[in-house]
Amino acid sequence: MSKKQKVRRPKPRLPKGMRDIEAGEIRAMNAMLEKIRGVYELYGFEPLETPAYEYSDCLGKFLPDQERPNAGVFSFEEDGGDWLSLRYDLTAPLARYVAAHYDALPKPFRRYATGSVWRNEKPGPGRFRQFTQFDADTVGAPTGAADAEMCMMMADVMEAVGIKRGDYVIRVNNRKVLDGLMETIGLDGEEHATTRVNVLRSLDKMDKFPRDQIALLLGKEGRKDESGDFTKGAGLDKEQIATLFIFLDNGKTEKQNALLEEGLGELSDLQDLVRAAGYEEDRIRIDPSVIRGLEYYTGPVFEAEVTFDVKNDKGQVVQFGSVGGGGRYDGLVARFKGVEVPATGMSIGVSRLYTAMQMLAQKDRPDPGPVLVLVMDRERLADYQKMTKILRDAGIRSEMYVGSSGMRAQMKYADKRHAPCVIIQGSDEYEAGEVTIKDLVKGAELSKEIEDNKDWREGRPAQFSVKSDELVEAVRSVLARHEG
């Protein structure tokens, strides 16, 4: 006889840097997205949806390396030889859309968009290759009023999702200030363009690395991380690095130039606008240490930072940091049009904002699942289904158990589904015209206080019976008990 061949089955493994998102987080994030959408709509922005991938040449020079289509993005070549790339952010598709429909669009053009973006970068703790952004942009507005509005809207988003004043701040700087600063240390001119980008990307990591590690990235020696990966230094000398750090600490430098002064003037004007609208320093603050590493920013840049303390992977107390940002990018649409088109925008990191909210709320239990109707008698499935329908008609999220297991397994299922309560109707309850409701949340709390099994059996904590026609009212009372 021939030997039976072993069946080869694929391993159920996730791609590196990706993650599965389960029901509780999806619902909570959807609720958060609706609150953000409400703020954008209130400001008069309109939705726009663009494809998940674009022609690689349309994504432009703000990719990590425009000469290599797969550097920083996920790309593939189609039959005709053109390269396509999954979108790196939501701004590049907007620039392509505006350029294609420029004459027909109202100007300024105000749009918001949400969706997944992909980055072909090294994953790490809390750093994924696919994540969701929620953007708002104004194209065709050359004045600082549009930038001030973005900062105010970002502050309103923080409060709309439940982050109170004192737990966040919108920090604002200006790329003209930063570029002027580059001139003061001799990095002006096209020949230093690459170095300027590397310097800004290094400074943009100041919220992640201590200053001595940033100095390595800025200097000539470079930096090796814990995994052994090496990042080449930007090539600055010690005096140049010291000048940068002094300015980032106090906004001052011994040297001045026209670009630096222009940027400082724009910051002063923006501050006047937000203060006139009632946004004080506790909400929107000028901060010379704000660095946005992307090459296309041309004016004000801003970040939404959550300021409460959390513990990192090493147990150290640190601030949570940025959950979004943006700035002015007057040159992006010009790649298509050949003329400068002023634009400014903001982007919220949805997953990161959600994580911040979870830490702030310090939730100790997942979001509730559906009310579960247990099946005690298989011959009465229709009765249980009718009971479930009554709950659903009343707007109560409910399900009937459709498995084949007994009561013990059904209760375990209810726990895994995070059901707030279960509905029980055995033969005794049926004959009495009653249902039994077991409050699982209260039961879990009471179980911590009961040490004796006899007390548990006799007390049956958080379990009560009502008449069948009182089911909806009783379930609502249980749900109301645990709201929030």
Image (cartoon, rainbow, N blue to C red):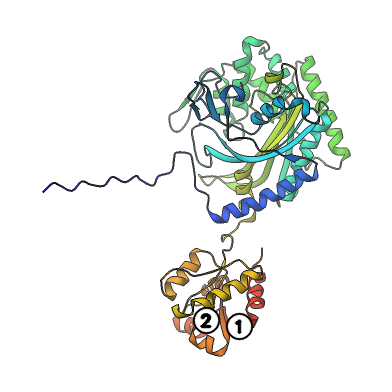
Residue 368 in the image, given as x and y percentages of width and height: 58, 63
Identify residue for label 1. 468
Residue 443 in the image, given as x and y percentages of width and height: 54, 74
Residue 174 in the image, given as x and y percentages of width and height: 74, 26
**Where 370 sits versus 434, above or below?**
above
Please tell me which residue lies in front, 4 or 123.
Answer: 4
The image quarter in which residue 218 lies: top right
Identify residue for label 2. 425
Question: Can see residue 166?
Answer: no
Q: Secondary structure at mark 2?
A: loop
Q: Disc 2 marks which amino acid?
A: Gln
Q: Secondary structure at mark 1?
A: helix
Q: Label 1 crowding class (10 Å Cα cut-off): few <14, some 14-19, many 20+? A: some
Residue 378 in the image, given as x and y percentages of width and height: 44, 78
Q: Residue at x 28, y 45 (%)?
A: 8
Q: Alpha-carbon distance for marks 1 and 2?
A: 9 Å
The image quarter in which residue 194 lies: top right
Q: Disc 1 marks which amino acid?
A: Ser
